[in-house]
Amino acid sequence: MTENNQKQTMRFETEVTQLLNLMIHSLYSNKEIFLRELVSNASDAADKLRFEAATDDALYGGDSDLHVQIDINKEARTITITDNGIGMSRDEVIENIGTIAKSGTKAFVESLSGDSKKDAHLIGQFGVGFYSSFLVANRVTLNTRRADMAEEHGVSWASAGDGAYTIETIARPQRGTEIILHLRDDADEYLEDYRIKSIIHKYADHIPFPIRMQSIIEAETDDEGNETKAAEISIDTVNQASALWTRAKSELSDEEYINFYKHVGHDYDGPLSWVHQKLEGKYEYTLLLYIPKHAPFDLWQQDAKHGVKLYVRRVFIMEANNDLLPRYLRFVRGIMDSSDIPLNVSREILQKNPAIDAMKKGATKRILGQLADLAKEKAEDFTTFWNEFGNCLKEGIIEDFSNKAAIAKLLRFASTETDTQSASLEDYVARMKEGQDTIYYITAESLAAAKHSPHLEVFRKKGIEVLLMHDRVDEWLTQHLHDFDGKKLQSIAKGELDLSNIGDEEDKAKMEEAAKAAEPVIEKVKKALGDKVKDVRSTHRLTDSPACLVSDQFDMGGNLERILKQAGQEVPTSKPILELNPEHALILKIANIDDEATLENWANLLLDQAILAEGALPEDPAGFVQRINQMLAH
Ligand code: ADP
């Protein structure tokens, strides 16, 4: 570490400056959240100290009364928020709130909508809470000292939010952090005790450390102006200061649950739903887990910022996600508090600890149960959930074998019966035709491509529902989900299709006759296409189109092959099977052509249009255009 004692002026990176400008000039509604953010940081700092002190008691230096103090100075027009938590070193100050824009800062600036009210809500989620000080202050001073450093290694940071800040090393006897906000002229209201207290009740009642404020009882005087009772200063604790999850469910209001979520979930919006449960058995633990209303910006990033918080007997240990819940539930927020884990637990121990394992399993079951209840009782909320997190949940089918059946019930798809992703597999099974024992689906690049696929023609004719899968993850999903409720799942673009059990006998006989009649033309097309295709055969999948492509049952299929190729993976190209509609006018026409060159043109045209209908490109697009033009001109 390089120590530079002198006062230095440093510039923020462009994105931080942009952010500060926004705080000062644009995000004017809901300014009061600055206090929520600063108190939340102070509480995290106290949590961190308590965790480190669990293995090194000396860090307390005799003062283990962790708390946050708020002081108002009307003359100086300042509010000071002080904690005796972990504090920061000079390097940490620079890294955490200094020069460099954290990934969250950039993401925050990018996601701004211009609607001040909405944008202010995003502050907590993106981890730029400290800067919300500038919503009410035109100058901010932060003095801090890390608990494990000597007195002379204190740090003072100051900025007027104008693109630069100063930093210097100071002597600071007390550990922890003090933030002094020099209020702007329009922020008078925050100099009032009652206003600050009401904000704390609103946002910070559940913070598990006392938040203290001075209250001054004015001196009493008699008629002659003699002081009969001296002014008194007392320190009051303003919040409840108990860990919310340790309280009985019956004691807690929805509002308290929601406010706690806003703190642990770093989300201004309330949650969609929550589970609060104390479990006693071989292992004892408490869960308070929330399902958010919307996805965080980093849901699809490997190093997502937030997760579930792990506590051991009310001591905060760490925030982690993949260790405490399976990865496909990474959107869940909240806390897990175990009574069976050593306080000095490390990440390595976490992964092997049987108590964590039991808690992870229990939490997974409860979240899935909660989602099942939501689907049953609050369909609209479940739709919100599905639209935000459905694709995460699909990963569960691949990842979590033991809960596969429960997850499968939660899946929703678009289908030929509904354009929105709202068909469950149970719905599908309930709508199955008499004689149908298979759940049919098609995978494609987009809903439009799936919906207009020629493969659907015969299903439409017979009124058989087909699931329209168009998310990339669906390709993997279907490789792991082979059946549901005893019914096989089958791609309608793979293998031989046998719908003979569904529909009437007459149809069947007619089809067989047509197929027989088409044998010569099929032979001709097969010869003309040579090794471009695996096979050419007659189909009964089609009613309106002349041709379509099919993969062998165990081949990868065109859609997956394209996805993998786009991702730069080497995949063996499996040749498709071309199926021809024996009753289509075009096929009947080709049956009468004997000229080899003309026949070859027609055969290639059939193949290429079947490729196009899948949403893919023919191997030789220019050749395809040429062929079409040639035929149009004839
Ligand atoms: P977030 O808290 O979401 O990470 P902030 O901008 O509010 O984003 O804070 C950035 C970082 O600065 C925190 O993660 C923490 O490491 C540090 N920090 C902020 N306030 C304090 C404090 N009172 N005590 C110790 N560290 C703090």
Image (cartoon, helix red, strand yellow):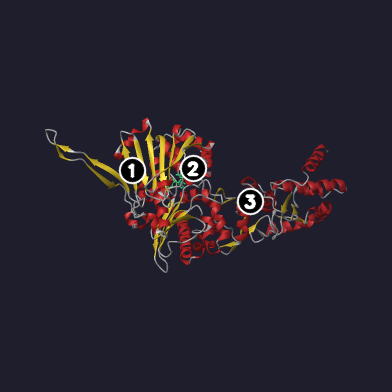
Q: Amino acid at mark 2?
A: Asn
Q: In the image, which is nearer the foreground, mark 1 or mark 2?
A: 2
Q: Quadrant of residue 130?
A: top left
Q: Earlier in the sequence, mark 2 or mark 3?
A: 2
Residue 9 in view here: yes
Looking at marks 3 and 1 on the same chain, the residue that comes earlier in the sequence is marked by: 1
Location of mark 2 (residue): 4
Judging from the image, what secondary structure is the residue with disc 2 in? loop
Q: In the drawing, does residue 294 fall left or right of residue 433?
A: left
Q: Residue furthest top?
A: 185
Mark closer to the observer (3, 1): 1
Query: How many residues crowd mark 2 within 10 Å: few (<14), some (14–19), many (20+)?
Result: few
Q: Which residue is mark 3?
A: 460
Q: Which mark is residue 70?
A: 1
- At which x and y percent is residue 380? 46, 48
Q: Secondary structure at mark 3?
A: helix
The residue furthest bottom is 282
Give the answer, above or below, for where 396 lies relative to 219: below
Mark closest to the chain's N terminus, 1 or 2: 2
